[in-house]
Amino acid sequence: MANPLSKGWKYLMASFDNKIDENADPKVQIQQATEAAQKQHQQIMQHASQIIGQQKQLEMKLNRLVADRDKLQDQARQAIQLADKATADGDTAKAQQFNNTAEVFASQLVAVEQQLEQTTALHQQAEVAAKDAVAKSKESEMRLKEQMSQIDALRAQADQAKMQETVTKSMDSMNQFGTQDGSVPTLDSVREKIERRYADALGAQELTQNTVGDRMAEIQQSGTDMRAAARLEELRAEALGISAGSKGELEAGVEDAEEVVDETVTSAADVENSAAQSETNSAEDVEDAEKK
C-alpha cells in the first residue's frame, strides 16, 4: 500500500510545478531552453574533443613505437654483423659479446613490436571513434543552429503575444473605462451626461425661439417687409407715370399695411404683458399659500 504522505507530497509537487509552468514568463523559459541547448552542445563538443585527443595521443605513441622498432632492428642487425665479423676474425669472446647484445636488442624489439601491435589496434578504434565524434559534433552544431532559429522565432512570437496582450488590455480599459475604479466615470455615464446637456440646450433653444419677443420681432420684420414692398410699388408707379388716383391707392395700401403692423405689435405687447401679469399673480398666490 502506498504511503499517503508520499503520495500527497508528490501531488503537491506536481501541482506546484503546474502552477509554475502556467505563470512562468515565456522569455525566461526560452532563455532556459537556450542555455540547455548550448550546454548540451558544449558537452558533446567537449566529449568529441576528448575522443579526438585520445586518437591523436595514440597516433603519437604509435609513431614513437615505430621509430623505436626501426632503431632496435638496426641495432640488432649491427650487433649481428659485428658478431659475425668477430667470429671470422677468430675473436670468440668478442663475438659472444656482440651476440649477447644482439639478443638484448631482439628482446627489446619483441616488446616494442607487441606494444606496437596493441597501439595499432587501439589507434584504429580511436580513429573510428574520432570520426563518429566529429560526425556527432557536426550534427550537434546543426541541431543547435536549428534550435537557435526556433528560439529566435519563439522569442519574436512571445514579443508579439505580449504586445497583443498589451493592446487587448488597452482596448478593454477603453471599452470598460472606470469599471475597476468607482471614482472614475464610465464612458456610458459620460456619454449620457453629454447627451442630456445637449438635449437640455436644444429644449432651451426651442423655448427661446417660441417666446413672445421672438414673435414680435417676426411681426415687426413682416410689417417692415410689407412697407418696403408698398414703397417699392410706389416708386415703380412714379417711374412709370401712373395717374394720381393709382398713386393715392398705393399710398392708402402703405398706410393700411402700417396700421396692420401697428395693431399686430400692440396685440403682441398686450399678450406679453398679460403673460407677465399671470406669472406675477401666480408667484403672489404661491407666496400667500406658503404664508398660510
Image (cartoon, rainbow, N blue to C red):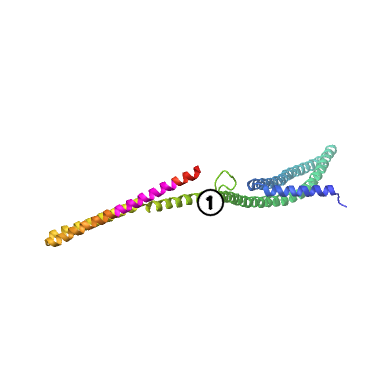
Query: Crowdedness of circle 1 by 10 Å Cα count: few (<14), some, many (20+)?
Result: few
Q: Nearer the viewer, residue 62 or 267?
A: 267
Q: Which residue is mark 1?
A: 188
Asked which quadrant contains residue 58, the reply is top right
- Whole-percent x and y of residue 210? 38, 54
Magenta includes 159? no
* Identity of the residue drawn at 26% across and 53% down: 262
* Identity of the residue drawn at 78% across and 50% down: 11
- Whole-percent x and y of residue 151? 62, 50
* Disc 1 secondary structure class: helix
* Residue sticking out furthest to the right: 1
- Whole-percent x and y of residue 80? 80, 43
**In the figure, is residue 39 to the left or right of 216?**
right
**In the figure, is residue 56 to the left or right of 159?**
right
Magenta includes 277? yes
Kind of residue at badge 1: Asp
Q: Nearer the viewer, residue 123 or 86?
A: 123
* Residue sticking out furthest to the front: 292
On screen, residue 84 above or below 261: above
The residue stretch that appears in magenta = 264-283
- Whole-percent x and y of residue 287? 47, 44
* Main SS, magenta residues: helix
